[in-house]
Amino acid sequence: GVPAVSLLEKIPGLYHAGLDNYATMEQMVEHLIVAHSCKTLNYVGGPADSQENLLRRQAYEDVLQRYGIPLENDRIWNESYEVESGVRAFIHFQEKHLLPDAFVCANDFVAMDLVKALNELGYSVPDDIWVCGFDDSQEASYFAPPLTSIHIHGQIMGYTAANLLMTRIEEPSLNYRTVYTETNLILRESTGD
């Protein structure tokens, strides 16, 4: 009975201020296929049961299918949004001899960790493999190479959440709502852009 708004992760029964994880990831994967002719893309996701991750993964799978690229479950790694999962994902793919044209990562920190692992073994990003992240963290723009990412407008999302909360307080009988904040694909050197 207490008015509340969930941010990012949708929680049943609460108003929700978030982003369209599906459409956003769809844009990223489609860019890699159309602009860069990627034929193999590995997905490095967050927790397998996270709603955000499930939507991002579904977009990845749907775009591959749309462009006639076979979906290989071994090219999907779900673990966490923690930095170290980038290295563990890389080890997994390397052991299976499944290094791709591009890695599509659930967030920037996983992507940056993955780039470091690639560099340590002599691979060059973007010359050998492309890597993209998600969240457009402050570090993404000055990382070497600067990381292609999805920019989330956090201030706008906060403002939206506050407005939703005020709406919920003023009109408690209204049905639950979701409001998505716009995102932008930020193209940088890690994908050769």
Image (cartoon, rainbow, N blue to C red):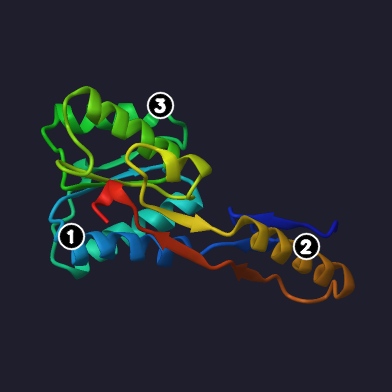
Q: Amino acid at mark 3?
A: Glu
Looking at this rendering, what residue extends furthest in the top direction? 120
Residue occupied by mark 2: 162
> If you read the primary sequence from the N terminus, does the residue marked by circle 1 or circle 3 appear first?
1
Q: CA distance from mark 2 to mark 1?
A: 40 Å
Category of crowding for the residue at label 3, using alpha-carbon neighbours closer than 10 angstroms: few (below 14), some (14–19), many (at least 20): some
Q: Nearer the viewer, residue 25 or 58?
A: 25
Tell me what residue is drawn at x 81 percent, y 69 percent.
168
Q: Which residue is mark 1?
A: 36
Marks 1 and 3 close (CB-CB < 8 Å):
no
- Residue 47 can be seen in this image: no
Q: Disc 2 residue type?
A: Ala
Q: CA distance from mark 1 to mark 3?
A: 28 Å
> Residue 78's x, y, as percent?
36, 39
Q: Residue at x 16, y 47 (%)?
A: 101
Query: In the figure, is residue 153 to the left or right of 162?
Result: left
User: In which image quadrant can residue 187 be found?
Assistant: bottom left
**What SS does tag 1 mark?**
helix
Sequence-earlier tag: 2 or 3: 3
Eye-nearest disc, 1 or 3: 1
